[in-house]
Image: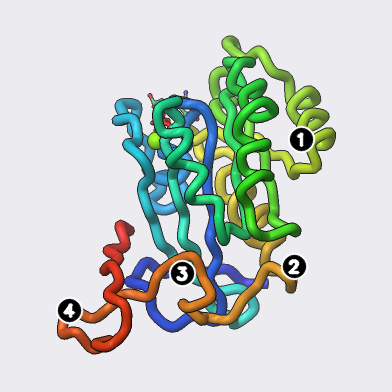
Amino acid sequence: MTSTVVSEPIGKVDHLIKLVIVGSAGVGKTCLIRRLFTDQFHQETVATIGCAFHYKRYTFDNKDFGVTLWDTAGAERFRALTANYYRGAQCVVLVYDVTQRSTLDAIAEQWLPDFNLHCTFRDAVKMVIGNKIDMVDARVVTPEEGAAFAREHGCMYMETSARTDEGVYDAFVWGVLQNIVDTPSLLRSNNYERLDIEKPVRPDGEDRGRRRRRWWQPRC
Ligand SMILES: Nc1nc2c(ncn2[C@@H]2O[C@H](COP(=O)(O)OP(=O)(O)OP(=O)(O)O)[C@@H](O)[C@H]2O)c(=O)[nH]1
Ligand SMILES: [Mg+2]
């Protein structure tokens, strides 16, 4: 299997994949995505407001996959809003910080129940990620505990460091995307009408006569 990444506006692809990343505030969701898509890490970050949208095209076995990645805010005040993004998601990535046990507890108490309640794919891929493994001395959740937790809740498990890049590509591409690609029930044709993402309308109004839709501006 080959995997290449193309950063470009949403165009014709064989399949669209919707991936939502959730977890408590400050666990490193935005840093993981930045590492995956731009191979950068910034110590100083700004808390996500609501949700940020990213798009990237990957090629697996000569088929194009458009991956829409929804980076949600971990702050409690956005909880109700985040539930809206689960609809149509083939995958949820549940991130916790290995130096803060409360963020792992929050997956069991909040993030996973919320996703199970609102998701629309019975076979959705669920991946628990323990992030910040570079902070060896501050670590409080062991890899064994993390893996046992994920197993108990029917999820895959990986550990990462957005800072050092350890495990990031493996978790998202070989873990999450590969699993989706290998699950036929999760793959849908490139038919925007059936997807949770809305087809962009050309500014020249090409789609006149149909309901006006938003013009998505991919961010990377
Ligand atoms: N040491 C270390 N710090 C990290 C890592 N990932 C993120 N951080 C730091 O953790 C802080 C929060 O990172 P964000 O990516 O903004 O966290 P978030 O989960 O997106 O937070 P919200 O948007 O508020 O939900 C920042 O100061 C990052 O520099 C990591 O792998 N290792
Ligand atoms: Mg964020």
Would you identify the image quadrant in which residue 26 lies?
top left
* Residue with the mark numbered 1: 150
Would you identify the image quadrant in which residue 174 lies?
bottom right
Q: Secondary structure at mark 1?
A: helix
Residue type for callout 2? Thr
Q: Residues within 10 Å of mark 4 (few under 14, many from 20)?
A: few
Q: Secondary structure at mark 2?
A: loop
Q: In front: 59, or 87?
A: 87
1 or 2: tag closer to the N-terminus:
1
Residue 150 percent location from the top left of the image:
76, 35
Can you say whether 10 is above or below 14 in the image?
A: above
Q: Visible in this render: residue 170?
A: yes
Mark 2–mark 3 Cα distance, whole angstroms, equals: 18 Å
| Residue 203 circle label | 4
Quadrant in the picture for the C terminus: bottom left
Residue 201 percent location from the top left of the image:
27, 78
Question: Would residue 207 appear left or right of 58 to someone viewing this image?
Answer: left
